[in-house]
Image (cartoon, helix red, strand yellow):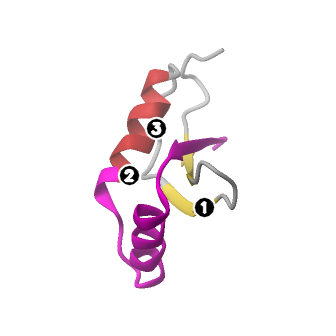
């Protein structure tokens, strides 16, 4: 399955919370749902749950998610 990389704008406090949850083996549902919605917005069909891969170091901070998508879904 191909992966679709999603970058969600965030703030440092939320990014830290998402990272802490990830390290504890839990999911920040709000940002995971936002990543899934972004995939749909780009015309792709998610094939699984978003996987948190980290945060950017710059300003603004961005949450990074990889989402597997179906090959036969549309897109640009």
Residue 17's label in the rendered image is: none
Q: Is residue 39 above or below residue 49?
A: above
How far from the left and from the top, in percent, is residue 51?
51, 59
In the image shown, does 52 or 20 lie closer to the viewer? 20
In three-dimensional space, the C-alpha distance between marks 2 and 1, rounded to whole angstroms, equals: 12 Å
For marks 2 and 1, the one nearer the N-term is: 2
In three-dimensional space, the C-alpha distance between marks 3 and 2, rounded to whole angstroms, equals: 15 Å
Residue at the image position 69 percent from the left and 61 percent from the top? 57
How far from the left and from the top, in percent, is residue 75?
60, 17
Q: Which residue is mark 2?
A: 31
Q: Is residue 28 magenta?
A: yes
Q: Which residue is mark 3?
A: 46
Q: Is residue 13 above or below residue 22?
A: above
Q: What span is in magenta?
A: 1-30
Quarter of the image with the N terminus is top right
Q: Is residue 26 magenta?
A: yes
Q: Which residue is mark 1?
A: 55
């Amino acid at each position: 399955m191909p992966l679709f990389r999603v970058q969600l704008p965030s703030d440092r406090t939320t990014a830290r919370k998402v990272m802490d949850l990830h390290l504890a083996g839990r999911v920040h549902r709000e940002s995971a749902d936002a990543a899934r919605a972004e995939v749909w917005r780009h015309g792709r069909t998610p094939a699984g749950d978003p996987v948190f891969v980290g945060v950017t170091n710059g300003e603004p901070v961005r949450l990074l998610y990889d989402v597997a998508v179906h090959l036969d879904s549309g897109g640009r």
